[in-house]
Image: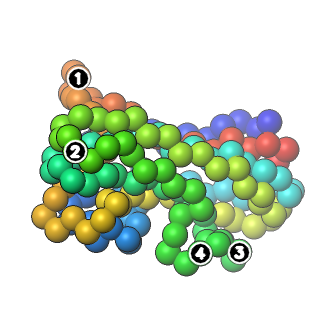
């Protein structure tokens, strides 16, 4: 296995008025990875975040997009996603982890992003990534890539 690549932040992120169907980047600067394998290989991608809502009635979805000439498999959709916990409560972080293994072609550059949305239209409602703070930092949000045979 090659060396893992990780993007981590202890900032808190917000998404207000998600339409429930369009995936938004959590942070295009922090949670974007580009990778060009030298040969055909697999990568294991993971996204980890504490998700919560300020408004009851909405779940929070987290996903990982893959982009190059052959991805995404379905336009506008992540290659993998996970719906976070219940929607009845507020201010109660729920740890969410999404993982995907995918084949890459050598010499192609792939771009991976951590994305999110609500489970249904949420006009005026806000969802959050990152719980806390403790000593001025929020729980880590992470996007990771582990090459296998690259």
Q: Are marks 1 and 4 in contact (CB under 8 Å)?
A: no
Q: Secondary structure at mark 4?
A: loop
Q: Earlier in the sequence, mark 2 or mark 1?
A: 2
Determine which residue is flagged by label 2.
88
Which of the numbered marks, if any, corresponds to residue 3? none
In front: label 2 or label 1: 2
Q: Nearer the viewer, residue 132 or 38?
A: 132
Q: Secondary structure at mark 3?
A: loop
Determine which residue is flagged by label 1.
134
**Would residue 123 be seen by someone viewing this image from the given angle?**
yes
Please count the marks in the image.
Answer: 4
In front: label 3 or label 4: 4
Q: Residue at x 61, y 41 (%)?
A: 5
Q: Earlier in the sequence, mark 1 or mark 4?
A: 4
Q: CA distance from mark 3 to mark 1?
A: 42 Å
Determine which residue is flagged by label 4.
74
Q: Is residue 22 above or below residue 57?
A: below
Q: Nearer the viewer, residue 69 or 119?
A: 119
Q: Residues within 10 Å of mark 2 (few under 14, many from 20)?
A: few
Q: CA distance from mark 4 to mark 2?
A: 31 Å
Q: Residues within 10 Å of mark 3 (few under 14, many from 20)?
A: few
Which of the numbered marks, if any, corresponds to residue 70? 3
């Amino acid at each position: 296995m090659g060396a893992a690549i990780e993007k981590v932040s202890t900032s808190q992120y917000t998404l207000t008025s998600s339409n429930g169907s369009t995936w938004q980047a959590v942070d295009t600067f922090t949670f974007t990875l580009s990778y060009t394998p030298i040969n055909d290989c697999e990568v294991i991608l993971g996204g980890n975040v504490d998700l919560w809502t300020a408004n009851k009635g909405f779940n929070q979805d987290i996903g990982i997009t893959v982009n190059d000439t052959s991805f995404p498999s379905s336009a506008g959709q992540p290659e993998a996603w996970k719906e976070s916990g219940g929607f009845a409560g507020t201010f109660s972080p729920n740890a969410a982890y999404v993982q995907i293994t995918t084949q890459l072609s050598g010499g192609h550059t792939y771009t991976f992003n951590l994305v999110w949305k609500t489970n249904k239209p949420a006009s005026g409602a806000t969802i959050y990534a990152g719980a806390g703070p403790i000593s001025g930092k929020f729980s880590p949000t992470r996007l990771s890539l582990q090459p296998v045979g690259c």
